Image: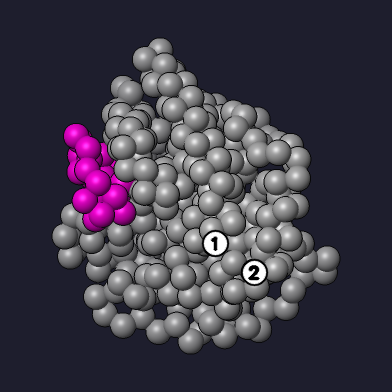
Amino acid sequence: MTAGQSLADGAAGIALLHLETGNRPAAYEALRHATAGGVSISDGASLFYGAPALAFVLAGTDHPGLAPARAVTADGTATVTRRRLDTAHRRIDRHEQPHYAEYDLIRGLTGLGVVLRRLGDNELLRQVLDYLVRLTEPQGELPGWWCWNGPERRQPPPPGGHANLGMAHGITGPLTLLALTLRDGIIVAGHTTAINRISRWLDAWQQHTDGTIWWPQTITLTDLHRATPTQVTPLRPSWCYGTPGIARAQQLAAQALHDITRQRLAEAAFTTCVTDPEQLRRLTDRSLCHGTAGLVATARRVASDALTSIPLAAVEDLHRQTAPTPNEPEGLLIGKAGADLVTAATTAWDACLLLT
């Protein structure tokens, strides 16, 4: 794989930073680096790699000199999406469980849907939504998104697989895309049914500990049979797996369904999270993925849609006071570019995090 094509940690993410902050010469240099080895439309292409990643970045600029690149990457995104949809539907037809990379935000069809939404390709986006609706159909006692693989790439999966709740790799990514498109008026058969299925699942695993509301990162078959998660306390309040991302997903779902009760609960969960010093101490870097930048980006979007005021000063201060880690990488998800974007940018770049 060519690292330059990576939105997560390569030149594509650097280009996004420079486009958003108006440094066009630096953006074009990063784009040249990103495309020097060609643009991938392989099975590994996704929102964060290859043609779809570059399509997402280029959609943020209307520079006429980049029009051919926008067209090529949009076509590549469509090619990748159609192929991935065909593979996913055939897997469902065989009644097999998915790998979360089939549907998630980072590598899967939810992320491709994010790119299509940014490009305005609503016809193909509706096909992604049809797939996500189908993904939520139960398979016996298990939800349709129950994965045969485990959450950790370098560890064997738990017996019987798992269900992932995180925004980056779990079912709250599909929930958010379904909610945003419903709010946009891009609607398919079974749309609200799918949102309600996921929402009821999250309701079943909602936890309350010492005045805080939170959700476990994953659920195993053992957890399912015990009806209680192995995880007993909230972990770090990250965008990728933690309560902030999950709460934002539920806030958007509630808005789409005009469910004031659910929206208030989601916003209460977010507030109890970001006012809990013990949870905030678990953030040890300033990255977007699992650090203070991701918390700030999420907090701003939650607060902008909240029914009651959510103060942002504490999380903004936390981000400013968190020093770069030694050898901080340059990239978007876990490096300097993401930390700087949160400080400098004001546009909808954070659609790549499914925050808007």
> Which one is nearer the viewer's eye here, 192 or 211?
192
**Mark 2, residue position:** 24
Q: Callout 2 environment at 10 Å: few (<14), some (14 to 19), or many (20+)?
A: some
Helix or strand or loop: what does disc 1 sit on?
loop
Q: Marks 2/1: CA distance?
A: 10 Å
Rendered position, 165 above or below 136? below
> Which one is nearer the viewer's eye here, 279 or 190?
190
Name the amino acid type tagged 1: His
Tell me, yes or no, if residue 352 can be seen here: no
Rendered position, 82 above or below 5? above
Check residue 14 for magenta coloring: no
> Which one is nearer the viewer's eye here, 249 or 207?
249
Which corner quadrant of the image does residue 151 belong to? Answer: top right
User: Residue shown at 16%/60% (left/top)?
Assistant: 258
| Magenta extent | 178-206
**Mark 1, residue position:** 63
Residue 174, position in %: x, y?
Answer: 38, 44
Helix or strand or loop: what does disc 2 sit on?
helix
Q: Quadrant of the C terminus?
A: bottom left
Q: Are marks 2 and 1 in contact (CB under 8 Å)?
A: yes
Name the amino acid type tagged 2: Arg
User: Residue shown at 53%/51% (left/top)?
Assistant: 67
> Which one is nearer the viewer's eye here, 210 or 294?
294
